[in-house]
Image (cartoon, rainbow, N blue to C red):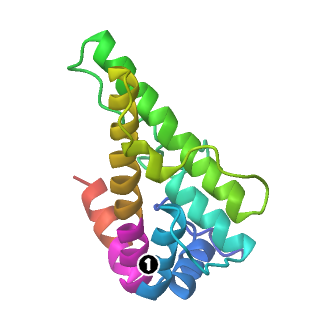
Amino acid sequence: METPKKRQIMRYNDSEISLIKNTFADEDILKELRKQFLQMPSTLKLAPDSLKVLRKTLLPEIEGDAPVHQIVDLWLTLNIKERTPEDALLVIKARKMLMDYFKQEFSILEGKKARKIKFSKLTDIVDDADEMVINITARNEIVSHLEQQLAQLQVLAVQDTQKLVDEMLKNSAK
């Protein structure tokens, strides 16, 4: 008799959770990741499979085969409902810069290209008010997003995954 296929209810599959537990449980690794992504001196070297999971965490993409209620991308979390079109455009441009920034940093980790967006320059005062708002907003979102996702990795790395799954199943039944 064939064993029934295990139902995946989290964004990460079992092998990704295992990799997270084995790679990202050490807070020093998370601090090195922070340094790397904030363009500070870092000695970080990650295996390709770790980079793949990290990319899934920091630059999520909508996946058709993801479990229900587990799809996300960085556009989905953008709140522009209460904004004027002019204000929304600045926020949209800042989010695009955040996404370009993380794509750039992954390319650098993979040894593919040089930096165009310099984190330290995002706080430089410029004459164009819109550009200044976009830069500061992007900078703050980069830090906030990075910290939130590193915290998520830390929780997944140290928490009993079965308890998380049980909690998710309990909440989905409501």
Q: Is residue 4 above or below residue 59?
A: below
Vertical position of residue 81 compared to residue 86: above or below: below
32 or 25, which is in the foreground? 32
| Residue 166 location, quadrant | bottom left
Q: Kindly identify the amino acid type of the residue bearing the numbered disc 1.
A: Lys
Asked if 110 appears above or below 164 in the picture, the reply is: above
Tell whether position 158 is magenta: yes
Q: Quadrant of the N terminus?
A: bottom right
Q: Position of residue 141 (x, y in %)?
A: 36, 46
Image coordinates for residue 14, horizontal then vertical, percent: 57, 74
Check disc 1 and report its element: helix, strand or loop.
Answer: helix
Q: Which residue is mark 1?
A: 31
Foreground residue, 140 or 152?
Answer: 140
The answer to if 11 sits in the magenta stretch is no
Please name the residue shown 48% across and 45% down the image: 71
Whether residue 22 sits left or right of residue 156 in the image: it is right
Q: Main secondary structure of the magenta part?
A: helix
Left or right, 45 with respect to 67, comes to right
Residue depicted at x 32% and y 63%: 168
Q: Where are the magenta residues, as a range? A: 150-164
Q: Position of residue 43 (x, y in %)?
A: 61, 81
Q: Is residue 77 visible?
A: no
Residue visible at 41% across and 47% down in the picture: 69
The residue most toward the right is 112
Left or right, 28 with respect to 130, comes to right
